[in-house]
Image: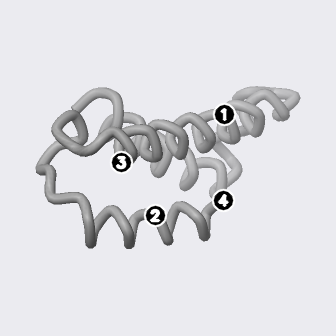
Amino acid sequence: VIVANAAWIAVDTDHNNADVLVNAHPIFQIAEHVFCMFFLFEWTVRFCAFKSKCDCRKDTWFVFDSVLVSTMVVETWLM
């Protein structure tokens, strides 16, 4: 999925002329929402897998993914 997202970013960069997602062609909007939902779902599953939720702060890969997913959510759904 990460490789597919990277490939889609390349397509998006080359063919999407809109400045913001709302003004983009629907295919670009749909793809962006699908990738965002998938990564958020993956993050949620990983978070739920921690026996003690406080331990997620000690897992550096989880913290890194949290920053990436948070950035993607803000960019896709809040901006």
Q: Residues within 10 Å of mark 1 (few under 14, many from 20)?
A: few
Q: Are the residues tagged 4 and 1 within 8 Å (C-beta)?
A: no
Mark 4: which secondary structure? loop
Q: Which residue is disc 4 drawn over?
A: 1
On screen, 7 above or below 27?
A: below
Mark 2: which secondary structure? helix
Marks 3 and 1 sit apart, C-alpha to C-alpha, by: 20 Å
The label on residue 67 is none
Q: Position of residue 41 (x, y in %)?
A: 66, 34
Marks 2 and 1 sit apart, C-alpha to C-alpha, by: 19 Å
Task: Say which label, 3 or 1, has the lower sequence index.
Answer: 3
Q: Position of residue 26 (x, y in %)?
A: 33, 39
Marks 3 and 4 sit apart, C-alpha to C-alpha, by: 16 Å
Q: Are the residues tagged 2 and 4 within 8 Å (C-beta)?
A: no
Q: Which residue is disc 3 drawn over?
A: 28
What's the residue type where badge 1 is placed? Phe
Marks 4 and 1 sit apart, C-alpha to C-alpha, by: 13 Å
Quadrant of res 39: top right
